[in-house]
Amino acid sequence: MRRSHVVAVALVVVAVLFIGGPSLLFADSVDEQVTEDTQETPELVSLEDSESEFWRFLSPEAEFHERSPINVIVRGESEDVLRAMSEQGDGDWGEIEEVEEEVEEDAEDGPGNGTVLENNTVLENTTVLEEHHRHATGIAWGEADGTTRYAWVDPGEGEDGYWATESLQLEEGEYYGQRYHIRLYESPNPDDEWIAMQAHTEHFDWFTLRHRVDGVEAAQTKVEQDFMNLPGVDAETDVRRIHIDNAGPSDADGWTTVVDLTSMVVLPAGVGLAAGRRYRRSAAESVGKERTHPAEEGAPERGLTDVDRRRLAAAYDRLEAGHLVLVFAILALFLGVRMGGLLLERRASFLTPHMIAALLYPVIAVGVPVATYLIARGLTSRLDAAIAAAGSLSLAIWLDYGLLGVDVIRLDVVLQRSLVVIALGLIAAGAAKRATRERRFNDLLLAGVAMWVLVLVGTLFGYL
């Protein structure tokens, strides 16, 4: 029993050091700051020479919850704005929201080749929605893709405000990797000629089977730079930022980009947004610059005492081939799911996202703990097996974030990852030979399995 306590404490230390520590050193671990909600109609944002107004946040339901800040506003005719963002040029923006399921009969009587937006405005002779029901990769998107967010808009002139859903959703990137995601909301008054947008970066989380928002600032900057690179746009006069006091959620700073396209009567056909490259510092380059001087390489060795050397020798003697097999198995399974999702997204166009998730999620939910148990049965020490499993899962998690380029991690995600690391370590410890001498299904193993199941189920249902 005492040894079980040692293993449990050691796993907590590993989780804190390998998950909590790196999240503080190499990534911004932030809590989701959400301002107070209100049921009363809040102060709305209005634009110059515009009668209509909008609320500065989006909400997950038709109530005033300050969740997703509006961070881009484009002035101009809807067809020009959407053509600039949707047509294929140098950029890779693609339409991801499914087409409206049904169009009202009076809208069907309108122009035959138009695109109907949320407020039944028809865009004639445009190529905005070239890939109906499909992302640029050819995968058919399901209903869960692009969760609905509500924007409160007021047409003005004594008309009542109402909750509007997005007119269109655009994305650049990969569904099972990291992507830029934009929701677009058209003015309720067609004469005002503006489109409000909420842009953010997000990555697919295989533990939740949903996208986790990383932040809004990088996506806002990308959209801003793309419009600056558009021919006919003056970066100094047509693009600016205004403060609309919507800081708080994620990394929002309260400033919104305003792009004025009203001076552009007709956009050149086929002109797309220039795809701004997202530059990231390369860890490999920084490591390459930090070279250890040859004279310093032996410094740590000179400080070792005889006791230290004996401890290192004892640890080396306990090292088994099974430890390496366990480490590489966990790395291969965890990272293989990410790579497999990206591969199927690109190559298997007949699979929907739900089908891909159904195929690959069991590898994490079942494959990782089962492989850990089977391999750890050949190991002797409970503590060594636990540290090997927990350490390799921690490494896999950080390699996954590194491949995606995620640099902002919420505190609830850090907690969830720490718990799964501890749970897998307990499973490995409970499978080791010294743990199964009396009972195969011992306390460590049962605690690890129960914790793994509870954490994954709680994550899927949104409790973690």
Image: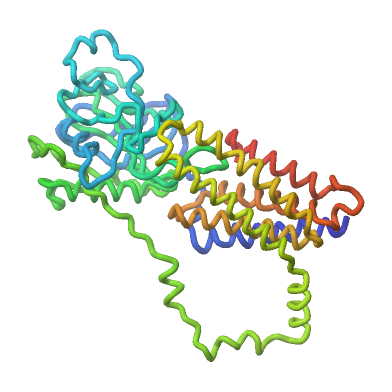
Between 209 and 232, the one lying in front of the other is 209
Q: Can the viewer see residue 355?
A: yes
Residue at x 52% of width, y 64% of height: 25
Q: Is residue 213 above or below residue 118?
A: below
Residue at x 74% of width, y 43% of height: 449
Residue at x 66% of width, y 41% of height: 366
**Percent x, y of residue 151:** 35, 29
Left or right of residue 299, residue 156 in this image: left
**Percent x, y of residue 211:** 47, 40
Q: How is the image coloured?
A: rainbow
Quarter of the picture containing the C terminus is top right
**Percent x, y of residue 132:** 31, 27
**Quarter occupied by residue 434:** bottom right
**Percent x, y of residue 433:** 84, 56
Disc count in the image? Answer: 0
**Quarter occupied by residue 452:** top right
Quarter of the picture containing the N terminus is bottom right
Q: Can the viewer see residue 247?
A: no
Residue at x 77% of width, y 55% of height: 429
Q: Is residue 157 above or below residue 242?
A: above
Name the residue at the right extreme.
438
